[in-house]
Image (cartoon, rainbow, N blue to C red):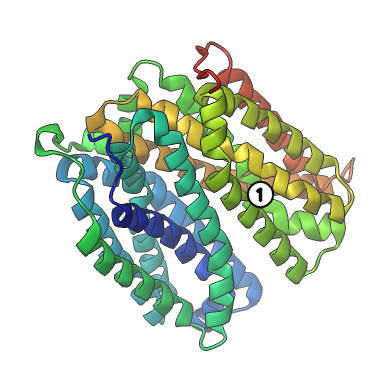
Amino acid sequence: MTATPPPRLALAFILITVSLDAIGIGLIFPVMPDLIEEVTGGTLSEAAIWGGVLATSFAVMQFLFGPVIGSLSDRFGRRPVLLLSLGLMALAYLGMALAETMAVLLAARIFAGITAATHATAGAFIADITPAADRGRRFGLIGACFGIGFVLGPLIGGLVASLDTRAPFYAAGALAALNLVFGFFVLPETVAMGKRRSFTWARGNPLGALRAVARLPGLKRPLLVFLILSIAMNVYPSIWAFFGKARFEWDTTMIGYSLALYGISFAAGQALLVGPLIKRFGEHRAAFWGMCVDVTMLTALGLVTSGALALILTPITALGGVVTPALQAILSRDTPDDAQGELQGVLASLNAIAMISAPMIMTSTFATFTAPDAPIFSPGAPFLLAAVLMGLALFLHNLKSPDEARPAP
């Protein structure tokens, strides 16, 4: 590993790749109901069921293949894995654009879920080229790019879909292909031949990789904190639209604006706040205070009754965005150089578990407390549950951790 600054174009490629992962996911959201209705000839309700199947299958593939892709990058290097994944991603989107049956559409979406596991390799690339003390800031940039993609994806998808129902899929495929060409010319290899290790399925499968990484000294508890944190924070995409409609009577446009505000705030926080906060407080204390902010904001959103106040609170949640990159930096620092890809793959799988479980947990909680016979009408109940989970993560994080804060400059 080198501690010298990375070439700017190579870093730009990595950040673009992460943005494309998010854009590719959000790009198809506005058009997916119409496309499923077109393919199946069914009703909107039936399309919604298929939409859930497609979303779950994507997350399951992320869970299964995150460690595989990460471990392959430890064996063959970051460059070939990233470039090959982008090429296959472009083909997956082309398959979705051309799909005439749900079987083909589902197969293409599954394939896209596998290729989108490049997030793990991108994180490993950042770890390769960045000194341990600066990794938190760089992981924050990855989070910022994902937030930007979260905002741009649905906006671009809605505009492009006005041309044709399948146009967003062609656009997503074209973006992946163009980034592949860009990466071919600017992306260096960062894993030296002497530091590569053999690939084994025992370590490549998610459970085996998790066991292997958890056996490293001091990583078991931070991994558990990362999982609980991910489940709690997935409350936003899981129920925000339902929450806004039930609590504030927001229409679709207002919900879209509020989601854009959240995405912009998150991206700005990741890009502008993570580095200074980690430098000021250190990784451990930055994560601690970020979780305190998250507990406060989740509780406030669970109790708020004013839509305007909810919008005012939304940008403040950006302060809590320091937690994930700080935890990533702690985990990356304590992981050997030849296992960085495996670690990032495990984190991708844990995040996928959260993406699979959180919608079920949060939507069922929402349904329980908004039903006509609910003992207490509380659309914000999922946020209160998320606050409890975040409190548990905070307790575990601070249970027996050394003070890793660096002295203030």
Q: Is residue 339 above or below residue 33?
A: above
Q: Residue at x 50, y 12 (%)?
A: 402
In the rendered structure, the answer to whether residue 322 lies left or right of residue 374 reads: left
Q: On the rendered structure, is 181 left or right of 168?
A: left
Percent across and percent down for residue 313 are 78, 46
Count of numbered badges drawn on the protein: 1
- Percent position (x, y) of residue 117? 36, 51
**Kind of residue at badge 1:** Tyr
Specify whether 128 is left or right of 26: left
Q: Residue at x 32, y 66 (%)?
A: 179
Residue 110 visible somewhere in the drawing:
yes
Find the residue positioned furthest to the front. 409
- Pointer 1 residue: 236
Q: Is residue 388 above or below residue 126?
A: above
Does residue 341 show up?
Answer: no
Residue, x 73% and y 42% (percent of image)? Answer: 382
Residue at the location (53% across, 76% down)?
36
In the displayed orientation, state which residue is furthest to the bottom: 163
Residue 251, image x, y percentages: 79, 69
Which secondary structure lies at badge 1?
A: helix
Question: Residue 98's spot in the image, x, y percent?
Answer: 37, 81
Q: In the visual, does 223 lie left or right of 155?
A: left
Q: Residues within 10 Å of mark 1 (few under 14, many from 20)?
A: some
- 90 vs 375, nearest the viewer: 90
The quarter holding residue 111 reads: bottom left
